[in-house]
Structures are given as structure tokens and as C-alpha cells.
Image (cartoon, grey):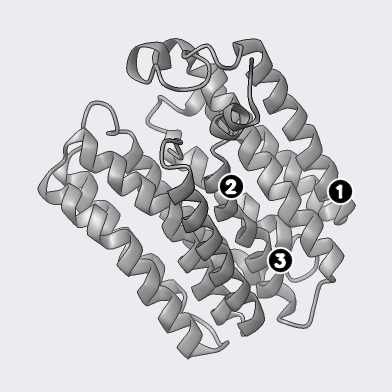
Amino acid sequence: MTRVADYLDLVRAPASLTVLGDALVGALSVSGPGGTGAARKAALAASSVCLYSAGMALNDWADADLDALERPERPIPSGRIPRSRALAVGAALTALGVGAAFAGGRASGAVSLALAGSLWAYDLRFKPTPAGPAVMAVCRGLDVMLGAAGPGWRRALVPAGAVAAHTVAVTAVSRGEVVGSTRATGRAAAVTSVAVAASGLLGGGVRVAALLGGARYLSAVLPGQLALARDPSAAQARDATRAGIRAVVPLQQALAGRAGALVATAALLAIETVGRLLARRRSGGDIT
């Protein structure tokens, strides 16, 4: 019998918390701390979580044969969730995500359609190709633009670019989770992370909050990437990938500080804490 925990494993539930801040950062970058109603922010956060979870379910559906060889413990090859049901979960979550985005406005709904298309394209076509990291970066950048859709959207290009660049680095590292990575990949990821942290200081906002967020981001992501540059083994690539996935929340904190939103920065810090607690309780779950 399939349990709720099996579906949580399918969609990498703890990791879904890392997308809650994407649309929020986009909205704050455009309208500042006082703009955009709470209902719209909640709808867009729900859209981000649904679309991210859909992408994870689709990932396992598309990779079921490969996972049977490389990751037999995952829900589909282990027999805990039928492959057809994983596809149904991915499709249903996609529809829910797009619907939630349209509830936040037509412009956000239009961005969600582009995001959903990019997610499906990544999982079904681009993931194993050289373009894979770039396509995944587009997905994450669009997730930030989900909150910025509408007048003034160009003000969100820097935070969207920062999250996208971080995603390129993490996705490139993740490709070595089974067969091992390269030292050059670790070095390139580390250089990218430093540049991403610096982008949080561009513009106005509360510079102290942006600086602290950037420092916390680097403390979370750099050790694993530098370790990968010394030891490009599969185990080290997995550790660096896990750290990179979680490090996006401190990055969001830096970007919220850049927008001058101290309350949002504190909320993202709370989300990060919850994510860490959930990850510890579900130590056997997979987030990569």
C-alpha cells in the first residue's frame, strides 16, 4: 500500500520549502516591502511549491528505468508508487500550480505557463543533455519572475539572475551524484557562488541584511563545492548538491534584504529552520 510518506519522497517534500521565497523575492524586488497583497503572495508561493513538486514527480517518472539501476530505493523502482501514478501526480500538480498562479493575476499566470513548459521540457527532453543545467536555471529564474510579473518586472532581473546562476552551479554538480564529478566543476561552482552572493549587494535595500544573507549563503554552499574541487567523487557530489539545494534559502534572504524587506527576511529564516528540522526527521528521504 502506498503511504503518504512515499508521495513525500516522490516530490522531495523538504526541498519544496526552498522555492517558497522565489516569487516573494520577485514581488519584493518590484514593489518593495509594502507592495503586493498577502493573498497574492500566498497564491504564488503555493504555485511555486506545486510546480516544483510536479517537476520532481515528473523527474522520477521520466528516469524510472535509469533509477532502477542507479537508485533502486526511489519510490518507483522500489515499487512503492506505480510509474503511471507518478505521471498523474506530476500532471495534477502542474495544473494546480498554474491555477494558483492565475489566482495571483493574469501576468503571473502567463509566466507560470512558461515555467510549467520549461519544467516538462527539462524532465522529458533536456535533463541528460548539455543544455540541462541552463534549462533548469531558466525554470528557477521564471519562478522568481512569477512574483515580479506585471509593471516594473525588470527590477527583478538581478534576483532572478542570481537564483538562476546558483541553479546552474547546483545542477552541474548534481550530474556527478552517481558517476562522480570533476574538480573543474567544483571550482566553477564555487566561483559562481561568490558572484551570486555579491549580486545581493547590488542596489539599495538594507545592506546589512543583504550582507549577512550573502555570508550565510556562502557558508552553506561553498564548503561542499570546494570539497568537490579537491575530491570529485560521487559521494562528495551528492553532499554538495544537497547543500546547494538548501543554500538557496539564505540566498533568498540576502535578496529580500536587498529589497529592504526585513520581515520577509525573517520569515525566510524561519522557513530555513523548518526545512532543516524536516530534513533531520526524514533523514532517509531524498532531496536531490
Q: Is residue 241 above or below residue 79?
A: below
Residue 258, image x and y in percent? 55, 80
Using the rendered image of the protein, determine whether residue 261 is visible from the camera's viewpoint: no
Disc nearer the start of the sequence (2/3) = 2
Q: CA distance from mark 2 to mark 3?
A: 24 Å
Residue 137, image x and y in percent? 50, 46
Q: Nearer the viewer, mark 3 or mark 1?
A: 1
Residue 245, image x and y in percent? 44, 50
Q: Is residue 29 above or below residue 63?
A: below
**Amino acid residing under circle 1:** Phe
Q: Is 16 left or right of 235, judged from the image as shown?
A: right
Q: Nearer the viewer, mark 2 or mark 3?
A: 2
The crowd level at tag 1 (other Cα within 10 Å; few <14, some 14-19, many 20+) is: many
Label 1: which residue?
102
Q: Residue at x 43, y 38 (%)?
A: 288
The crowd level at tag 3 (other Cα within 10 Å; few <14, some 14-19, many 20+) is: some
**Amino acid residing under circle 2:** Ser
Q: Residue at x 42, y 39 (%)?
A: 133
Label 3: which residue?
153
Label 2: which residue?
16
**Amino acid residing under circle 3:** Trp
Disc nearer the start of the sequence (3/1) = 1
The one nearer the camera, 223 or 74, is 74
The one nearer the camera, 69 or 146, is 69
